[in-house]
Image (tube, grey):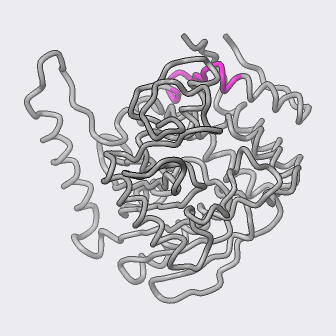
Amino acid sequence: MSKIYKIKESKLYEFCKKSLIKFGMDEADASITAGHLVQTDKWGIYSHGTKNLFNYINKKNAGGVSFSNKPVIELELPSLAVIDAKQTLGFVSSDFAMKKACELAKKTGIAIVFVKNCCHFGAAGCYVNIAAEQGMIGGAFSNVDKQMTVPGARGLVMGHNPMALAAPAISQPTIFFDASSSNVAVLKVLRAKAHNEKIPDNWIVDKNGVPTTDPSNYPSEGALIPMGNHKGYCIAMFIEIITSIITGSETSMSGNIPSWCFNLTAPNNVSQTFVAINAEAVCGKNVLEKRIEDMIETLHNSPKAEGNDRIYVPGEIEWEKHNKSQSNGYIEIPDDVYERLHQLEELSGFSLKIEE
């Protein structure tokens, strides 16, 4: 079982921020990036949180991502914008893009913002919650490097393109859904591999296209399985259309999107799309939250299956973990996150006090 460590949120945030500044990011972008990374850990989504900062910095040092470039708006219409991320780290350009989508949606009712030439943006849930916390419905979509097979194929065919959706609530800050179009994220398979653990047989296929519980040869062999097989495949295709195809960017099928974490020297070349819907324009101020709360109550009160005493709604588990961190005054992190943070201590020269 993974060992759990404790760290104060403020110390983790400052450590991440100072490390980013040391390696060339300005204070404003470092604050945004550190904030999203720490929030992801507070939700318990450790595969996409502060664990990855060590590798982001290594990628920057190897020339594969810029910590100094700024995203540039190439096209802006009343309800639409196109942004060139200039190979910035995805937290910077994605935060900028979703805030732009919200700004436009407040004027027109709905807005969509396309981003190209970007790098990994961590947990997509970070950005849709920017919209939801303003009373809007948010959507975020990204293409990624080729890591997934598709029904009838063998080997890597396309990206396990992730998406996230969020809306405002009352009993919890938002409801939100954040997932790749595969049955599991790459980083979760790699974590199991690092711990010599077996995995469910619906996570990956082996080199022959057969489902396997052994991740030891991944990623040199095998591929991720689409979520719901043909359903995840179709979702990934349409995410590809609204991210890379429409903007003329690199597609996951082309093989020209290198892995952000395995190929440190090459730009990631991913593209993303952000949507904001101004609910107030449709149904009135604070009405959506009340209707969502009615839905939550209905779901919570639905008949329970034998052996179950609770029904969760999207984002509820993550917000409960967030609230636990808030009330305890510290974030709990597993040993694989601790190991990477310790490596970053050595790389940055900054000390981070972690308790067992």
Q: Quadrant of the N terminus?
A: top right
Residue under the point 79% across and 24% down: 342
Q: Quadrant of the C terminus?
A: top right
**Residue 271, image x, y percentages:** 59, 67
Q: Quadrant of residue 337?
A: top right
* Magenta segment boundaries in residue numbering: 325-338
Query: In the displayed image of the protein, which residue is found farthest to the right?
Result: 349
Camera-nearest residue between 187 and 60: 187
Q: Quadrant of residue 309?
A: top left
**Residue 334, image x, y percentages:** 60, 21
Q: Is residue 72 above or below residue 200?
A: below
Q: Is residue 187 above or below residue 340?
A: below
Residue under the point 42% across and 33% down: 211
The total number of labels drawn is 0
Residue under the point 42% across and 82% down: 107
- Is 329 contained in the magenta span? yes
